[in-house]
Structures are given as C-alpha cells and as structure tokens.
Image (tube, rainbow, N blue to C red):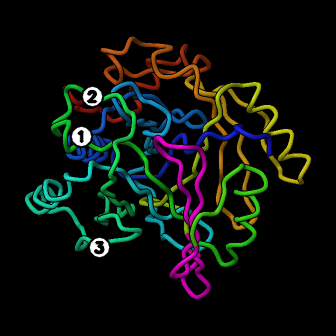
Amino acid sequence: MTDGGIRGIHHVTAICGPAQENIDFYSGFLGLRLVKLTVNYDDPTAYHLYYGDGIGSPGTLLTFFPYPDGYPGRAGAGQATVTSLAIPANALSFWLDRFSHHSVDFDRPSKRNQQETLSFRGPDGLLLELVAVPKENEVVPWERSPIPARHAILGIRSVLLRQRDPWVTTSVLVDRLGFHQVDDRDGRLRFEIGEGGTGRIVEIVNDLDGPSARPGRGTVHHVAFRTQDEASQAVIREELVRAGYHASPITNRGYFHSTYFREPGGVLLEVATDPPGFTVDEPEPSLGTRLQLPEKFSLYRTKIERGLPPLRLPK
C-alpha cells in the first residue's frame, strides 16, 4: 500500500431502530452533534443520520441507518462489533454518574492497555466503549452540546473486529491499508496507523467458538477508513483490485467519495475521502437542522418527506 494513503478511521456506520430514539441518545445523551440529516443513498425511504464533533470531522463520525421494523442483529465473528470513543482522562466519573442517572446499560469500568474503559450498549444493543485517553484528540467542540467540553467525547478511538481467522484480516490491514501491529495479548491483536488524532487503532479478537454475526438492528454495517483526496483513493482502489479484492467503483456520496470492499473475514470496509465535508450543502451553524437530499432525489422531496417519520431535532 502506498505510504500515507490511509489516515485512520473516517466513520463507523451501524443499523438502528427508530430515528428519534437514536437522535435522543447520541445527540441528547452522548452530546454528539447531529451534523447531517439525510436519507440512505440507496434507500430514500430511510433516514441516514450522521453524528460527530462540531463540524463533522473525519474520525469523529458515527452514522446510522434507522429501520424501526427491522430484525435485531447479533454481534459475532465476521463483523466489527465494538466501537470505542475517546474521552478526556479525568472524565470517567462524570460518565459513570450520567449512565447511572439515565438507566443506560453499562458494565463496571475496567483497565485495558493502562487506560480506563467503560463498556455500554446503545438503545438497540450496539456495543460501545468510552476510553479515557491521556492526550486529547484535535476535534472541534460542539458549543451547544449538553456535555461540558471538559468531559465531551473526543471522537472514535478504535474499532474491534471479531474473526475466526484474524491473520487473513491482518494481511488486509498491514499489506493493503498500511497499519502496523503494535500489540498481541489476551487473544487481541492491536494495529495503529498515523501519529496521533482520532480513529487510528483497529483491534482484532480471535473468536473461534463464538456465534457468527447476524446483520440487523444494533450491529455495525461497515467501517470506513479515511484518505486525503480522490487521487489517493483511486490509487488505493487500484491496488486493492490488483490484489484480487472486489472494490466497488468510486461513488460520490455527497460529503465524501467512497469505494467498498469486503475483507476475507467478512467485514465490509470502505475507503472514504476527507473532502468535501458536511458544509457542502448547508453552512456550519445550520448543520443537521434540515433534511438534505442527494441530488438524484431532489425532485422527489415532497414524496420522500411524507414517507419519513417526523423528528424532534436537537436545538
């Protein structure tokens, strides 16, 4: 892989239940900014919700496809299962109190790699963690967040993949995407890329005996890695195709360009460009306050809006 092609994690996309429940939890409770309210690029009957820091910086983004009548999924082998979010080193007690007072499903804090970790579940059972990091990531705070800036989430720290054979996925991360292995303990391989900032860690757990993954509500749909521009993305895609991966044609998703491929262990991965970002169709102060539609759906706005459930958006 060309040096410097991949810069870390761009976003993690999951499947959820009702859109309002999702907004209330990720924006109202966790304090992430709803930076874009749009529809699924391939299914305009469903919302696509994007959350991140104050401007939706790559590496801070969680996105969701809400399907309130969809079947519940099951985390398991062949899937990205846990998304870890960074918080300041002194913020753990704040979040413990907040979880307790709001009846969130969470576990007792534990320590991994010398960092305090708090595991919890989203409304649909999505597996999440807060990890107290000694150095703050460079993110743009959301000034209207219900969470004080000194305790606020700093972006994605890492994702965890569960695999029957972690070595085939290791080959993709190291040989094709440019990660390097930094640890191997307790059945967990750890890989890093870059020299700081959000979303630079991927971990793999060797899961020989656990259940296979089942897509559905409460599971991760795909993990996207970031690259600086379309030229870099084209080189990465060409190298993936040359290596035998079925990388999709590059598609304009409005806020970034994307190509998708499935690694041998079964996890759907994406390579997404940093630009143009979320201010391409609305100014920064108004991010996430109005339904934005891909150009191909713009003529059908009235019909689409009538088919979507009404939402109570963050103020």
Image quadrant assignment for residue 97: bottom left
Could you tell me which secondary element the residue under label 2 belongs to?
Answer: loop
Q: Dot 1: few (<14), some (14–19), or many (≥20) neighbours within 10 Å?
A: many
- Report if the CB atoms under discs 1 and 2 are less than 8 Å apart: yes
Quick one: 296 or 250, which is closer to the camera?
A: 250
**Residue type, label 1:** Gly
Separation of marks 1 and 2 at Cα, in angstroms: 8 Å
Q: Which residue is mark 3?
A: 110
For label 1, the SS is: loop
In the rendered structure, the answer to whether residue 173 lies left or right of residue 124 reads right
Q: Amino acid at mark 2?
A: Trp
User: How far is disc 3 from disc 2 in space, using C-alphas?
Assistant: 28 Å
Amino acid type, mark 3: Ser
Q: Within the magenta stretch, is there residue 202?
A: yes
Instruction: Name the disc covering residue 142, or none.
Output: 2
Say which residue label 1 marks. Answer: 31
- Magenta range: 184-213
213 relative to 129 in the view: left or right: right
Q: In the rendered image, which quarter contains the C terminus? A: top left
Q: Residue furthest left?
A: 101
Could you say which is closer to the camera, residue 199 or residue 128? 199
Mark 1 or 2, nearer chain start: 1
Instruction: Specify whether residue 102 is painted magenta.
Output: no
User: Which mark is first along the chain, 3 or 1?
Assistant: 1
Percent x, y for residue 74? 48, 70
Which residue is pictured at 35% across the width and 60% down the height? 129
Q: Residue at x 23, y 67 (%)?
A: 105
